[in-house]
Amino acid sequence: MEFSIALLKGDGIGPEIVDSAVAVLEKTAAKFGHRFSFTPYLIGGCAIDETGIPLPPETIEGCLASDSVLLGAVGGPKWDDQPGNNRPEKALLGIRSALGLYTNLRPAKLYPALRSASPLKDEVIGKGFDIMIVRELTGGIYFGDRGYREGRYGQEAFDTEAYSVTEIERIGRAAFESAMKRSRRVCSIDKANVLESSRLWRKTMHELSGKYPEVQYSDMFVDNAAMQLVRDPGQFDVIVTSNMFGDILSDEASQITGSIGMLASASLGETTRGMYEPIHGSAPDIAGQNKANPIATILSGAMMLRYSFGLSAEADAIESAVDTVLSAGWRTADILGSTDGTPLTCTEMTEKIIEVL
Ligand code: NAD
């Protein structure tokens, strides 16, 4: 099969890790008899340097013309002085919106070989955990009305959380469908004891759960969920939540797996075109040093094969190559325990994974 992939390498370690994922995808294509073509486009700080804005129209057009999109990361201290609406990170909201990507899937899985890298105690980890966080991506407070106004204590700033039934239902369906392919449990997270938008969220999720009798449904307040994730992460299968709660909880979930450099994500909408990216940022502190862990981006490539191209065997092959390399004890610096020896560079880790493939 043939697929075109738009590459948004971005800033910092973005180019290094995207190059690694491309090498792995090319090897996978060769092994399974597919052809993937890759076209790079500017996004983030490098786009500001070249064009003055973080998301040039050619990037949006290029992504819309591709079968799928692979993103590295954007941002860095060089662009910290940019005004709020021209910051590199603004491009992320813009591209998700332009591509109609309202569902964010973030798996947070503990690799048995990396158990000791988790900050949680062994008895808390128990049999391990494999959580899928389904985060709403184009609504809520990140997109609501905002501004400045005269308030009780003088000038104040405000942001607004708003969700429609349609938005809640479509993200809910994504969560229930995902649960059907996993352990068939969905926990919806909200703040319905305080927020009106959360009360509508909870009511809508309850109604939707009636359409999925095979799935065990529960709901939880976000403050409790933040505690439960570090108290008993194994209780969760699929978590579904709003944009802001998902942003925060998915970072917490990534931390308990041991390394931010291992976690992939997929952003999906109504079409098969998705955007796939590691959950970490551009890591300016290690950029250009060949030290970055490429696994999150390589696994994002595997998610692209599975969710956008329907190539499950190919995705399985990449995921199992990563498992094999980790089980054999190979590590980049970020997942190196104190007694594990010399770390691999980004390119060496990529080569190991390609060797196994
Ligand atoms: P970060 O994720 O870039 O880095 C946090 C820490 O994790 C750093 O010590 C970094 O070296 C390490 N790290 C991250 N990815 C790694 C990898 N693959 N291998 C090894 N170590 C890794 O978060 P930050 O420092 O808060 O943000 C840096 C920049 O990235 C900021 O400009 C921020 O806005 C941006 N950012 C972008 C995205 C994105 O593009 N999706 C997401 C988050 C942050």
Image: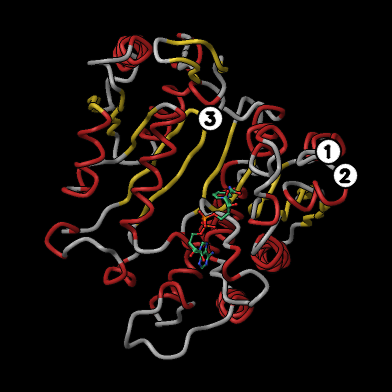
Left-right relation of 55 to 228: right
Q: Which residue is mark 1?
A: 56
- Camera-near label (2 vs 3) is 2
Label 1 close to label 2 by CB (< 8 Å): yes
The percent coordinates of residue 33 (x first, y second) are: 73, 61
- Classify mark 3: residues with Cα within 10 Å, few (<14), some (14-19) or many (20+): many
Q: Which residue is painted at 48% across and 18% down in the image?
A: 156
Q: Please, what is the three-letter code of the amino acid marked with disc 3?
A: Leu
Q: Please, what is the three-letter code of the amino acid marked with disc 1?
A: Pro
Q: CA distance from mark 2 to mark 3?
A: 27 Å
Residue at the far bottom in the pictured view: 341
Q: Is residue 272 visible?
A: no
Label 3: state its secondary structure.
loop
Q: Which residue is mark 3?
A: 137
- Earlier in the chain: of badge 1 and badge 2, it is 2
The tag on residue 51 is 2
Residue at the far front in the pictured view: 154
Q: Please, what is the three-letter code of the amino acid marked with disc 2?
A: Thr
